[in-house]
Image (tube, rainbow, N blue to C red):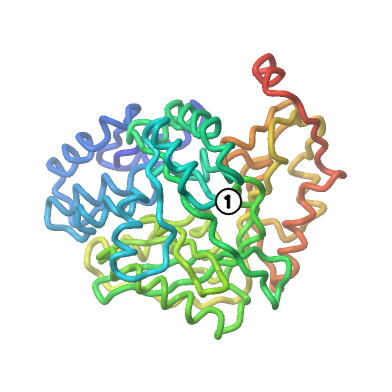
Amino acid sequence: MVWLAVEAPADRDRRRAAVSLAPTAIAVENPLDLAGEVRRAADTHEPDGMLALSERVVHVAQLAAHERGLPANRPETLQALQDKRIQREQLAKAGLAVPEPWVLRTERDCAAAATAAAFPAVLKPSVGMGSIATYLISSPEELLATWRSAMGIVAADDRIAHHSPVLLLEELLPGMDPVDEPRLGDYVSVEVLVTGDGPNILAVSDKLPLSPPFRENAHFLPSVRPPGVLAPITDCVLAAHEALGITHGVTHTEVKLTPAGPAIIEVNGRVGGGVTEELRLAANYDLPLQLARTAVRLPADTRPAFQRYAAFLTPQPPHGHHVVRRSPTTAELRAAFPALDEIVHVTAAGRITDSAVGTAGNLVKAFAAASAHEDLVDLAERITGPEYFRLEEISAGDKEKNT
């Protein structure tokens, strides 16, 4: 067992206790040391397979597995799954609808894009996670200042800084309002388990609308969209898997629903956030177990049997900087929302929220399950209401004083 030890001390102690029965348990503090430690552990123990779930470690583990002839994606596929710039090129070459990116390495690149790119547009790092440093650029005049801010955020974030990602500017894809459930957002995610027999659709997840700029509030599975809507979505995702040469593992693909049809936002070579828990709640399906089976070339169950709906809730604070003046206890939330299964996090009173950190800056992180999809949507919309949270907007300068 090798893990990237980036948690708070208490969380690190819990993880260490959880893996104490492993023959080897290695905590790696520097992401640049991870690949070497994984290779050394693999050389020592000669495993039959290698398993990783997090974005921060999955590509390293699969590369080491590929080097040893174990089930894994090819290095060029892993590179495309991690770097959106490379991924866009491969998807476009296969004829799939993807936004064409401008690569912004310098201020001169920004000046060229401001003159010729289409706006509104999305600015994002080529390697990222959790919507970090992702911004809506409404006009050319906003680009340079936002690019400078995003570059600073990327350089300071220990999850991605060591990848030295460039920033990409892409045309904002137009969305379509859902006709069957107007409270849902104009995009979905598709969860896929890829075995030796090929890609298998596990579930399509519906989403709430994003909070500005691009922060996720909740997603639900299985989808309630009709088969006629889902079929072209899953066809698009399967075509993307073929174009990228994905032959192993779990993927989480985000798809925008546009007037011209489904368009790939991005294909991620890892489990979607919260999906493991949602599949357990909705279908009693053990995704890590099935992925472990594929890692050692055993048959896997690829058909979750859904008995109810599950939700991963990550409601976001408003855009900008806010101090939390009132926050509920977990007991309050459980009493108000019996459908809650697990409450992972509640932002405490006195803390400062910052929308720039992306989806990770949520007010609540929790899982819920119910027999009716609309009950979960109701819960997601109400859980950060004024009876539970009170926030006060502050300036960036005030944020620095209180940090």
* Residue 137, picture quadrant: top right
Residue at horizontal 67 percent and vertical 23 percent from the top: 396
Residue 206 position, x and y percent, is 60, 67
Residue at horizontal 63 percent and vertical 37 percent from the top: 355
Q: Is residue 308 visible?
A: yes
Residue 299 position, x and y percent, is 28, 73
Residue 222 position, x and y percent, is 57, 72
Question: Three-letter amino acid code at disc 1?
Answer: Pro
Q: In the image shown, does 191 or 296 lie closer to the viewer?
A: 191
Q: Relative to residue 58, is residue 9 drawn left or right? A: right
Q: Say which element carries label 1.
A: loop
Q: In the image shown, does 118 or 379 lie closer to the viewer?
A: 118
Q: Is residue 359 visible?
A: no
Q: Residue furthest right?
A: 387
Position of the N terminus by quadrant? top left
Q: Residue furthest top?
A: 401
* As drawn, 49 above or below 387: below
Query: How many numbered circles are shown?
Result: 1
Q: Relative to residue 385, is residue 244 drawn left or right? A: left
Position of the C terminus by quadrant? top right
* As drawn, 327 above or below 294: above
Q: Residue furthest bottom?
A: 228
Residue 47 position, x and y percent, is 18, 51
> What residue is disc 1 on?
120
* As drawn, 71 above or below 215: below
Residue at horizontal 23 percent and vertical 59 percent from the top: 73
Q: Relative to residue 341, is residue 54 drawn left or right? A: left
